[in-house]
Amino acid sequence: MSTEPVCLACGMQYPAPRTTCPICEDERQYVLPGGQQWTDLATLRASGDRRARIEEQGPGLLGVGSEPGFAIGQRALLVRTGSGNFLWDCAAYLDDELITRITELGGITGIAISHPHYYTTMVDWAHAFDVPIHLHEADRQWIGRPDPAIRLWSGTTFDVTDELRLINLGVHFAGGTVLHWPGGENSRGALLSGDIVQVVPDRTHVGFMYSYPNLIPERPSVVRRAAELLEPYPFDAIYGAWWDAIVRTDGHAVVQRSAKRYLAYVEETV
């Protein structure tokens, strides 16, 4: 397991040596009160503080992460399709147990990540399973650890397999992307959204933000465009970035009415 520096706050991995984390210095994240702090995967594994966590999140979807979580704490999703398993988003922690258990489930054919906060240790994941990482080119500047496994795509949509489509909404980051799985939810459709479309405690709505920790709202034009882009896609469920952060039914309507409500408030029409 690699010893490249990993930011303790956000989980982003960089080539050594490293003293600053551009992700944390950006207004969409933050530097810890005690200043920039570092670790690495080898140190995290050796501590014995974490164990692999793989749990069902929905039909054909397994959450992948650790207990306790690390850094931002998001979990990835293993999408189990007829053409093989695909990893959506990336958990910062990786160890031999996770690699073994995912291999026993059939491995993965590729990785796609919603936005730079979840790039984390993606290169170690790609090397462990010998697969490509698909990132939107609009977020090229945020890649912490360049590697040949990284494949940049452009435009609004990209089909990573015959069953899975990436859609660049531009929320949160210019390359902010969601994954549409028409065959998900027993063919009723699923949207895997990271926090580009944020699943909130009130599961009848979702949220849209430029910065979550610093409470900066997303621009109205971006949210309007995102709703328009998602309008043609059917999906019943929405899977966010956190364990059990799931809208189980009526997902398409949830997104559309949430965008309408958001725009009404930020444009002061309510």
Image (spheres, helix red, strand yellow):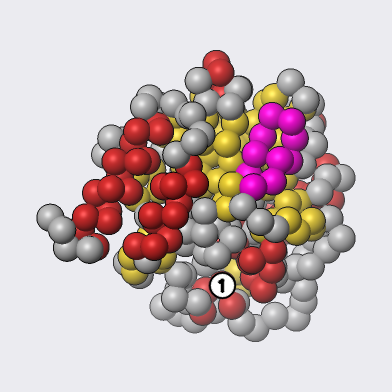
Q: Amino acid at mark 1?
A: Ile
| Image position of 111 (left or right of 255) | right
In the picture shown, does residue 61 fall above or below 122?
above
Which image quadrant is residue 220 in? bottom left
| Image position of 230 (left or right of 158) | left
Which segment is the magenta one? 157-166
| Spot occupied by residue 124 in the image (x, y as percentages of width and height) | 77, 54
| Spot occupied by residue 166 in the image (x, y as percentages of width and height) | 63, 44
Query: Is any atom of residue 154 visible in this view?
Result: yes
Crowdedness of circle 1 by 10 Å Cα count: few (<14), some, many (20+)? many
Which image quadrant is residue 99 in? top right
Which of these two is toward me, 218 or 38? 218
Quadrant of the drawing holding the N terminus? bottom right
In the picture shown, does residue 123 fall above or below 180?
below
Mark 1 lies on a secondary structure that is: helix
Whether the magenta-drawn stretch holds residue 159 is answered as yes
Residue at x 52%, y 53% (from the top left corner):
169
Residue at x 87%, y 45% (from the top left corner):
130
Query: Is any atom of residue 59 visible in this view?
Result: no
Residue at x 64%, y 70% (from the top left corner):
142
| Spot occupied by residue 195 in the image (x, y as percentages of width and height) | 46, 51
Q: Hey, which residue is sitting farthest top in the picture? A: 186
Q: Hey, which residue is sitting farthest left in the picture? A: 270
Residue at x 71%, y 35% (from the top left corner):
86
Which residue has dot 1 on it?
A: 23
